[in-house]
Amino acid sequence: MKPEKEVKSGSLLDLFRKKDQRKVTVIMSCVWFADSIVYYGLSLSVTDFGLDIYLTQLAFGAVELPARIACIFLLEWFGRKKVQAGLLLLSGVLCLIITGIPEGEPSLCEQSWAEP
């Protein structure tokens, strides 16, 4: 029997030793931070949607569950870089579209569906 080779364990400093690895680490850290802040901001402003807080949470859950399942397949089909770039681009475009909506415009939540 041959003795197993001892595997050297990595450390956090290994992410910053090489220039390319350092660049990727910094970029991914910034993207992770921005994604976390946006998600946290959405969860804090859940009451601003004009619906019951429980109904809004149900809507968030109804959207998030299929999105997570779709991410599994998207990652397998296209890879991490393409999926992340596409979804970040899509979210940026949607944010720009949202800023174009006038503030006084009635939303779907404010319209009365019971009246003819």
Image (cartoon, rainbow, N blue to C red):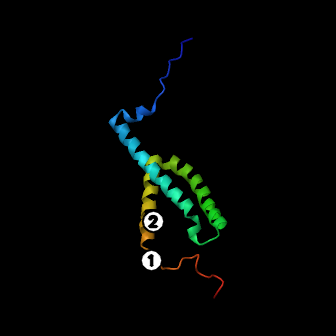
Q: Where is residue 100 in the image (x, y as percent from the top left)?
A: 42, 73
92 and 85: which is toward the camera: 92
50 relative position to 34: left or right: right
Q: Could you tell which of marks 1 and 2 lies nearer the N-terminus? A: 2
From the viewer's perspective, is the residue at label 1 or at label 2 nearer?
Answer: 1
- Mark identifier at residue 102: 1
Q: Residue at x 48, y 55 (%)?
A: 37
Q: Residue at x 45, y 33 (%)?
A: 12
Position above or below: 74 against 10:
below
Instruction: Using the numbered discs, state the Cα–Cα distance from disc 1 to disc 2 in whole angstroms.
Output: 15 Å
- Mark identifier at residue 94: 2
SS category of the residue bearing label 2 = helix
12 relative position to 18: left or right: right
SS category of the residue bearing label 1 = loop
Q: Which residue lies furthest to the bottom in this view?
A: 116
Q: Where is residue 76 in the image (x, y as percent from the top left)?
A: 52, 46
Q: Residue at x 46, y 60 (%)?
A: 91
Q: Quadrant of the C terminus?
A: bottom right
Position above or below: 44 against 102:
above
Q: Where is residue 48 in the image (x, y as percent from the top left)?
A: 56, 69
Q: Residue at x 49, y 79 (%)?
A: 105
Q: In which quarter of the image is residue 2?
A: top right
Number of marks present in the image shown: 2
Q: Quadrant of the N terminus?
A: top right
Q: Residue furthest top?
A: 1
Residue type for callout 1: Pro
40 and 32: which is toward the camera: 40
